[in-house]
Image: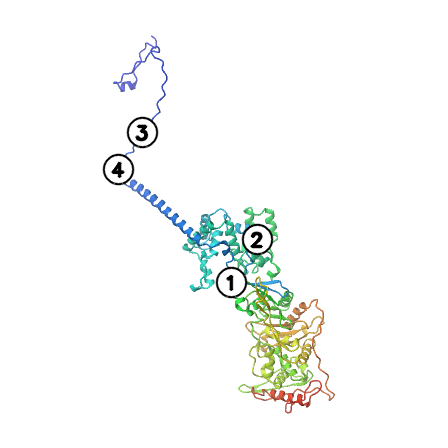
Amino acid sequence: MTDKNKRKRPLVADKRYPGKAKPKPKSRAQAKPAARKAAPARRKPARTKRPRRGGIGGFFAGLARWFWRLIWTITWRVSLVAFLVLGLAVGYIYTTIPPLDALLDGRARGSVTMLDREGDVFAWRGDQFGGVVSAESVSKHLKNAVIATEDRRFYRHFGVSPRGIASAVRINLSEGRGPLQGHGGSTITQQTAKLLCLGEPYDPSTGMTEKEYEADCRRSSLGRKAKEALFSMAMELKYTKNDILSIYLNRAYMGGGAFGAEAAAQRFFGKPAAALSASEGAMLAGLLTAPTTLSPTNNLDRSQSRAATVIRLMEEQGYLSAAEADEAIANPAQLSEAAEAEAGGYFADWVMSSGPEFFTRNTTEDVIIKTTLDQRIQRAAEDGLKWIFENKVRESSKAQAAIVVMSSDGAVRALVGGRKTKVAGAFNRATQAMRQTGSAFKPFIYAAALDLGYSPNDIIVDEPYCLNIPGSGQWCPKNYTKNFKGPVTLTDALKNSLNIPAVKVSESVGREIVSSVASQFGIKSDLAAGPALALGASESTLLEMTGAYAGILNGGSSVTPYGLIDLRLLGETEPLMGTGGGINERVIQEDAARQLVYMMEKVISEGTGQRAKFGGRQLAGKTGTTSANKDAWFVGFSADYVAGVWMGYDDNTPLTGVTGGGLPAEIWRETMSRVHEGMPLTDLPMLAPAPPSDFGEAQPVPEPQTSQPQGGGNQGGGADNVIDRVLRDIFGGGSSGDGASAPAPGFLDR
């Protein structure tokens, strides 16, 4: 049996559906060949609709879907409204932002630039602004350092950096602060917006000071941050990136009173911002974080350390190669010579206080002041003071000292107000401290006497001496050495700083006359009314005392110490004001002044001031020590310069083992020897007294009575002596050719 005839068994599926008859297959011959029809496209099976869930599950699923659709609908609508509001707010702020040029100089006040006697800049005060710079004109190192330090994505964001803010919040929280306290995550654009106070100019009518206004501009709050972000985005629309960076580089405070890159570059390095090296640019960029604390004039080492960190950031971000970074770190930025002078220190402070307030301390203009300062002499004074305290004073000592050096016309060439010379705004002991003058006052007693005709060779008796002071009882002055020398000349009395002869001469001449002479020479403070006037019981400043001695050197004319030569506005050629000091009216005759110089020369060559000698020069001066050794002075002069030194404690603690002829005289010597280096020897303008007359001995000085009332017209008989001398000068009675006078009756104590 063949397979063809074999009957096939029915399939299971056939049995399952018996109603369907299977068609008989056609034979190959019966099948007509026909064109193959294209297969119909396969239809996707119809998607069956998922039956709805019933019950609680279905209810909550539907509710969730409804909430999701609601949230989505609200979100995109609110977002659209928010973006519209944001766009309107940014657009409005855009219209209020002024042109670029109006934002480059944002100082609240002007600046003062001070020049020394040679015309070189040595100090700055106020808000310095060196001129407008742009991001394209400054050194590339400064520009790159600022971006690397402050905002590495500056050229890629739209004014606000969400990544930076998130990072700052994370750091603040990790360090235990509030999210907005500490790191701000601000872009350079945001920092510029803050510098602009978000477009809110200072308004005095609000009752806030400028300092309070600036503090309010820099406060952090959510509302303030939001407004800052809007303002930043508006700036990004208004200006280019380089414009924004230019505003920042012109307005940012960089320490030392410098606002903007140009002022800081000139202030610290003495060069324009376009010429800064990598290390210098890094130092300025490093100041932006904390300009006062990191200022190189406050702490150069700390500023250099911060600059090294900036240099490493520049290397990481590809602004410097490894070799360039290593070189910049190995050669850190150094301050210019003018910057090392710490903004002129005490001298600049004094000039600022002595000039008109509206052109100095509160100026709204940029002012140029030419001064009398000689920077070589200033360094000499600072070095002399430093040398003595390093070599002659114990390290733990809290004693202070001050120095003034001036010309005989009152032009101040150097001024040191304390041991810390590199300061600004500190208490100035040379101009502000009122201290008892001690024996440094005695030259004015002898100036009055010489002007009335006394001679340096006149005799006075150094012996026990007492005065009855009404209301106070008996007053008996003592010499510092506690002994007596008997008859001495006025010259010997001054050179050995004898107290009793000084009191006797003062009482003989008259206290009113002595006070008048001292006041006219420039000691403006209230002078003591009693006999202790002769012993320096009055107070004065070192500047006043040095100026008074300058009057002795110049031949007897008073001077007004001054440091300001002229003041002009920046860019102007004509000064607004000139010097306010110089030589004034004559106080004593020239011959009297020259005789006094002779007497004071003996103080240094033979007397209490011998430690001040140096270099074989003719020098004159006077020591001064107050009661209980609270103050020690040495004031003196060469033919070229006058210098004064004071030493003591700020709290009036007595000095231990220090007199005016000791450390103050040595400070004076160290200062003046440096001042006179390379200068020719010049004789003092002194006049030696003529030898005693042919009648034999020098004339005794008319002495006051040992017991007399205080005050009144006579003041110890002094006024009567003056009248008596004038009458003798007119009528020729008893006057000797050497200027010594015959004693008045009743005042002799032979």
Residue identifier under label 1: 109
Q: Residues within 10 Å of mark 4 (few under 14, many from 20)?
A: few
Residue 700: percent from left, percent from top: 67, 87
Mark 4 or 2, closer to the camera? 2
In space, the residues marked 3 and 2 are separated at their CA atoms by 74 Å
Crowd band around label 3 with a 10 angstrom C-alpha radius: few (<14), some (14–19), many (20+) = few
Gap in angstroms between the C-alphas marked 3 and 1: 83 Å
Mark 1 and mark 4: Cα distance apart in space = 79 Å
Query: Do the numbered discs 3 and 1 sit on residues whose CB atoms are within 8 Å?
Result: no
Q: Quadrant of residue 508?
A: bottom right
Residue at the spot x=31%, y=11% of the render?
Answer: 7
Residue nearest the observer in this picture, 566 or 600: 566
The residue indicated by pointer 2 is: 281
Task: Give amino acid for label 2.
Answer: Gly
- The residue beneath circle 4 is 54
Q: Residues within 10 Å of mark 2 (few under 14, many from 20)?
A: many
Sequence-first tag of 2 and 1: 1
Q: Position of residue 252 (x, y in %)?
A: 51, 56
Is 150 placed above or below 513 here? above
- Closest to the camera, between mark 1 and mark 4, is 1
Are dots 4 and 3 in contact, CB under 8 Å? no
Q: Is residue 137 above or below residue 512?
A: above
**Mark earlier in primary sequence (3, 2):** 3
The residue mark sitting in front, 4 or 3, is: 3
Give SS at disc 3.
loop
